[in-house]
Amino acid sequence: MKDIHAAVVRELKKHVETEYRIGAERYFKEGIVLHGVRACTVRRIAAESYRLIRSEPKPRIYRLCESLLRCGYSEEKTIAFEWTYRLQRKYEPADFMVFESWLEKYVSTWGDCDDLCRHAFGPFVYRFPECLPNVVRWTTSGNRWLRRGAAVVMIYSLRKGENLDAALQIADALLRDEDYLVQNGYGWMLKDASIVFPEQVLDYVLAHRREMPRRALRYAIERFNARERREAMN
């Protein structure tokens, strides 16, 4: 495993762009640790390196993912989450604890949170909806990434036309959250829910528009028509 991790890092370092790294570090207000490799290149390296490990047992791949996550570099986290996503046919309910622990221990930016929760964890929640009560409990956590993750992890299911009730329960719990990144997260969740459930989301937003922070409200109504947006913002 150490050899594979080292090979991934060597490949990343071939593509470092200092100016790109500096710009990205300025963009993430909460701080980020980067090699300085563009996202498209990171995804390509993830795909190529996965071929070296895809025949390994899932627990061994998870251990390798955790090795990447512990290093703290955003690119290595992206590769770990990409490998996890490629394992989705092998997901089983016990994996929830693995993914939840990664969210608690290794996520440190909204980019990390969204990468894990939308790309790898989202398909898991869709496949195993019995874990939804655990996701709802994240909304009371002092960890901002668990609270944001509770919303973002629902987006995959909502785009598949499932789990609206749980998503609205999460929105209720986060409605007055003071963290702007959590507000962005549940506003985004409602926006994507409105693609499949436009009437239900419009009704929800109109019923709660006085309580929702403006930031969350603006995200939630992006897909409404002009008349609906005016009504929601009034």
Image: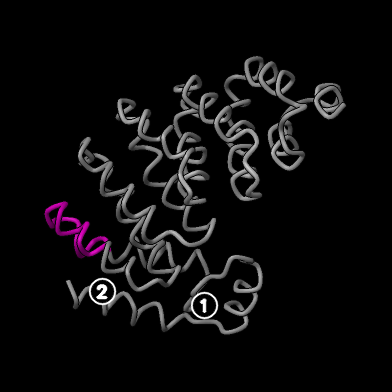
The rendered magenta stretch, by its main secondary structure, is classed as: helix
Q: What percent of the width, then of the height, locates residue 191?
A: 64, 33
Q: How many marks?
A: 2
Q: Residue at x 73, y 31 (%)?
A: 221
Left or right side of 214 for 199: left
Give the magenta range.
Answer: 50-65
Colouring: one colour
Determine crowd level at label 2: few under 14, some 14-19, many 20+ residues with C-alpha closer than 10 A.
Answer: some
Along the polypeptide, which appears first: circle 1 or circle 2? 2
Image coordinates of residue 112 in percent, x first then y, are 47, 58
For the N terminus, the image quarter is bottom left
Name the one closer to the observer, 207 or 120: 207
Residue at 24%, 39% in the rendered image: 89
Write the residue at 31% across / 48% down: 99
Relative to 33, say whether 125 is above or below.
above
Q: Amino acid at mark 2?
A: His
Whether the magenta-drawn stretch holds residue 54 is answered as yes
Task: Give the labeled residue for mark 1.
Answer: 36
In the picture, measured across the screen, residue 216 lies left or right of residue 72, that is: right
Give, as a three-letter code, the residue at label 1.
Answer: Gly
Check the image and report above or below for 128 versus 30.
above
Is residue 44 or residue 190 the one in the foreground?
190
Quarter of the image that includes the C terminus: top right
- Residue that carries the numbered disc 2 in the rendered image: 5
Q: Is residue 126 magenta?
A: no
Q: Position of residue 219 (x, y in %)?
A: 70, 39
Q: CA distance from mark 1 to mark 2?
A: 17 Å
Could you tell whether 15 is left or right of 26 in the image?
left
Q: Secondary structure at mark 1?
A: loop
Secondary structure type for disc 2: helix
